[in-house]
Structures are given as C-alpha cells and as structure tokens.
Image (cartoon, grey):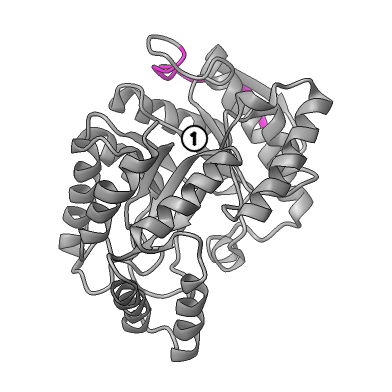
Amino acid sequence: MRFGMFVPQGWRMDLVGIEPAQQWEAMVNLAKHADDGDVFESIWVYDHFHTVPDPSREATHEAWTLMAAFAAATSRVRLGQMCTCMAYRNPAYLAKVAATVDVISGGRTEMGIGAGWYEHEWRAYGHGFPRAGERLGALREGVQIFRDMWTKGEATLDGTYYQVDGAICAPRPLQGTSRPGSEANGIPMWIAGGGEKVTLKIAAQYADYTNFDGGAEGFDHKSKVLKGHCDDLGRDFGSIVRSADYNVVIGETEADVEDRLRFNGELLRRGGVSDAKVEHHVENLRRQPAVGTPEQIVEMLKDMESRGMTYAIMYFGEAAYDRSGIELFEEKVAPELAS
C-alpha cells in the first residue's frame, strides 16, 4: 500500500496557538520529516480559505502557495491537494500554476480536483454558490482544459462555464515531457468525490486516481459504480488507482487513543468552537476507521487493500504539536503494509 500524509495548514484548526511567524516552520518541518523518510510517498494540503467546523479568524494557509513552497523545500515527496476546488481559480490559470509547481519540484506535482462544497467560503470570496449540476459541469470542462494545457501546451474551449482561446502553457509540466508522468494527462489527475452520476463518470473518463469513501461498505459501492462507468466508456477499471483519506488517531493503548481524541477536541475548543460541536466532533472521530491501536489500524487497512484501496492519505490532527503519532504509524503500521 502507498501512503500520503496531510500537512497541517490551519483549515481544521490544527495550528491553533502557534504564532503566525512560527506556523511555516511547523508546516515545513513536517514536510521535511516526510521527505527524509521512506513511508510517505506524498504530502497533501486542503484547498480551503476558512476554517472548519466554523469559519473563524484562525489561520488557513492557501494551498497552491504551499505547493510552491514545499516544492522548493523538499526533494523526494510528491505534492498534492485534496482537493483543489475548480471554481476558485480559472482552470487555464490553474493549469499554468500547476505546471510551474511541477517545474520547481522537478516533476512531483499531483493534481487533486473537485467540484467544491464549502458554501460559506464560496459566498465569502464572491463565487456565489451554483447548484451542484453547474459545479460539476464546470469540473468537467476544467479537467478538459488541464489535459490540453499539459499534453498539448495549449487549450481552446468554448464551453458553457469556461471560454479559453489559445491559452498557452509554457513551459509545460516536466511530467509527460522530460520526466515520466500520466500518459493521458501529464500531471497525474485525482478526481475527488463520490457523486455517482457525474463525478465518478468524470473520473472514469479522465482520472488517474480517485478519492472517495474510506469505509468498507461505502468503498465497495463507489468502486462498483466507478467500474460501471468505466465499462460504459471502454476504460480499463484497473488503470485507475482508488484512494481514500483517513483521520488517524493512533496510540499504543486504548487509553493513549483517548488522550489523543481529547487533544483533538481541545484544539477546536481553543479555536472558539462550542462545547456541543467539540463533543460531536470527538464522538464522530472516535468512530472513524483509522482510530485505534497499531494492530487495529493494520487490520483495517489490510481489509481495505483487499477491496482495492491501494493508496491511503493520512491526517494526524495533532501533528503540528506532537509527532509521536506519525512516528508510531511509521514504525508499527506502515511496515505491515509495505508494497
């Protein structure tokens, strides 16, 4: 199994209490930790502007700025966002940004892309909040523009949502030109989301990777739907890597796990989240698949691997303050699932 790791950027209130002047150091040191090791193939951030579960004045660092910074600060790990919201940036411009990050990184960019969902954030930044069908239509057109920009060096599309006329991508990404990359897309494309009628159909047509439900039952169902779309389009279902994200709360003992759960809740409380929401968050987190001892997490991941989930992206809520959970995962979980 392949592993990625989210780097805390503040979106989930995971930099609370760290002074702004020290936040980059906290983030880049975790990126370098992953880069120096051999467990995590990739590092990831979220593409959001306001915190959750409540919008607040706590820091949320911008995803593509971080991608460029991590590209310069690391040398091995691949760099992704799970996932970029198509509507937040013109897709021709975003294709250019991604190509630049690919050049800076020496060909290590992953493009995670989705239709977006955080309504408060959309409206706050002046994007309105179109109905789901319009957001998904824009996603479809945007990924077409990405593919043309990266593989042909130019895109023209007179679409419903986007119009580009000879948009040039120079330089093109290193991936697919001077470095190995996605045969179809240049930069590998991750279509994120489990919408069965549209999102997974777009994934069947364009994706190198998918990212959806990480629970056994949900994963099996979404995989079946994806396979149906692949069959309809004549796409080899096995050519798409299926991934999932996991909130990891790991401890040597169940008491250690409870300590980490309490710490995750306390971060939200310190960020101004109400006690009721904190309690709801902790209870929901407690039921997540990757919460438990190393042995329990290994068992869960082996089961998911048997179902076809071969790339897990792990989020450690306490990572900016305490690296011991990451280290325990590296020492006792990852070796049991080595490819």
Q: Which residues are magenta?
A: 162-176
Q: Quadrant of the N terminus?
A: top left
State the residue in front, 144 or 318.
Answer: 318
Quarter of the rendering containing residue 323: bottom left
Task: Look at 37% across and 56% down and name the residue there.
Answer: 295
Relative image position of residue 254 (x, y in whole percent): 34, 73
Residue 52 can be seen in this image: yes
Task: Look at 43% across and 47% down and name the residue there.
Answer: 313
Answer few, some or many: residues within 10 Å of disc 1's Cα (few below 14, many 20 plus, some between 14 and 19). Answer: many
Q: Which residue is mark 1?
A: 111
Q: Is residue 312 left or right of residue 60?
A: right
Q: Amino acid at mark 1?
A: Met
Q: Main secondary structure of the magenta part?
A: loop
Relative image position of residue 141 (x, y in whole percent): 69, 33
User: Relative to residue 316, is residue 235 depicted above or below?
Assistant: above
**Is 250 part of what is drawn in magenta?**
no
View extreme (top): residue: 178
User: Relative to residue 273, is residue 108 depicted above or below?
Assistant: above
Residue 164 can be seen in this image: no
**Is 169 part of what is drawn in magenta?**
yes
